[in-house]
């Protein structure tokens, strides 16, 4: 599926992608205030104000940026959860 967000984490230089399907089926479904906010998320990934290790998952980082969402979500910060996965390619000869 096509990538909606493609960025490089400034924290560790790892590529970060979010597919159109994941955005639609997870982000927009569970966080309706984020509909149409993919560029904001990409900005937070590229230029986070703060990065923390998730206290519950070693493979996740929590990235924070200033919220520019419309009221009532315009106060404070936006948190973007980035989960790192390892992709292993096997070739059979």
Image (spheres, rainbow, N blue to C red):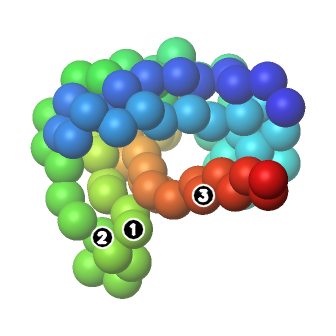
The residue located at (79%, 53%) in the rendering is: 93
| Quadrant of the snapshot with the N terminus | top right
The residue under label 1 is 59
For residue 25, which numbered disc appears in the image? none
Residue 63 shown left or right of residue 93 in the figure: left
The percent position of residue 81, horizontal first and vertical second, equals 43, 53
Q: Quadrant of residue 33?
A: top right
Sequence-first disc among 3 and 2: 2
Q: CA distance from mark 3 to mark 2?
A: 24 Å
- N-term mark: 3 or 1: 1
**Can you tell which quarter of the image residue 77 is in?**
top left
Q: Answer with left or right where residue 7 lies relative to residue 33.
A: left
**Residue under circle 2?**
54
Find residue 61 and report its horizontal and vertical position in percent: 32, 57
Q: Could you say which is closer to the camera, residue 75 or residue 14?
A: 14
- Could you say which quadrant of the image residue 54 lies in? bottom left
> How far across and how far down the image is residue 15, in percent?
43, 32
The extreme bottom residue here reads 56
Circle 1 SS class: loop
Point out which mark residue 88 bears.
3
Q: Which of 68 and 60 lies nearest the eye of the viewer? A: 60
Judged by depth in the image, the label closer to the viewer, 2 or 1, is 1
Q: Residue at x 75, y 44 (%)?
A: 22
């Amino acid at each position: 599926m096509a990538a909606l967000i493609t960025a490089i984490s400034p924290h560790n230089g790892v590529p970060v992608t979010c597919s159109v399907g994941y955005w639609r089926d997870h982000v927009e479904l569970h966080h309706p205030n984020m509909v149409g906010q993919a560029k904001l998320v990409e900005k937070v990934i590229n230029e986070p104000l703060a990065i923390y290790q998730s206290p519950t998952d070693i493979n996740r980082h929590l990235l924070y940026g200033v919220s520019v969402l419309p009221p009532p979500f315009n106060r404070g910060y936006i948190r973007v959860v980035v989960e790192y996965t390892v992709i292993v390619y096997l070739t059979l000869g």
